[in-house]
Image (spheres, rainbow, N blue to C red):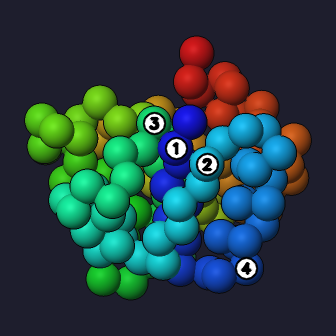
Amino acid sequence: MNVIVADDSMLTRKIVMKYLEPLGFSPFPAANGGEVIEMLNTGKVMPDLILMDWNMPVLDGYQVLQLLKKDDRYRGIPVIMLTSESDEANRAKALAAGARGYINKPFTANDLTTAIQAYLK
Ligand SMILES: [Mg+2]
């Protein structure tokens, strides 16, 4: 399963990728929202899942989510938001915009696995 890991923190990308690899996922890193759109539009990767930070430069995670949900090609890709924005308003906003789920930072490998399994059911 291909997973785009979008976060402007290199450390977070590395940690998430380290968590995903032993689970058999193939992670593809993106450093900002613009890179996510570029990866999709160039066909570099067709992901089965996108794990996406909220706060990123170029396009933030919420903006990318909105673009994906407006696009017939990408609407079906499940998106799980990874973010330190823990308030209910943003959680509700992401879910209303079509996010499959929401994981608050900081998270453990176990939190990530549990959430992915739950949200992909
Ligand atoms: Mg960020």
- Residue where numbered disc 1 is placed: 2
Query: Number of labelled discs?
Result: 4
The residue under label 3 is 48
> Where 98 falls versus 33 (above or below)?
above
Which residue is disc 2 drawn over?
26
For the C terminus, the image quarter is: top right
Badge 1 vs badge 3, beta-carbon distance below 8 Å: yes
Confirm or deny contact between disc 1 and disc 2 (CB under 8 A): yes
Spatial CA distance of label 1 from label 2 is: 5 Å
Q: Reading the chain from its start, which is encountered first: label 1 or label 2?
A: 1
Rendering quadrant holding ligand 1: bottom right
Q: Secondary structure at mark 4?
A: helix
Cα distance in 3D space between marks 3 and 4? 23 Å
Residue at position x 79%, y 60% in the image: 18
Is tag 2's residue or tag 3's residue first in the polypeptide sequence?
2
Front tag of 1 and 4: 1
Query: What's the amino acid at mark 3?
Result: Asp
Q: Are marks 1 and 4 in contact (CB under 8 Å)?
A: no
The N terminus: image quadrant: top right
* Amino acid type assigned to the residue bearing label 4 in the image: Leu
x then y, percent, for residue 43: 25, 55
x and y percentages locating residue 54 in the rendered image:
47, 65
Residue tagged by mark 4? 11
Q: Amino acid at mark 2?
A: Ser
Using residue 102 as the reference point, say whether residue 58 is left or right of it: left
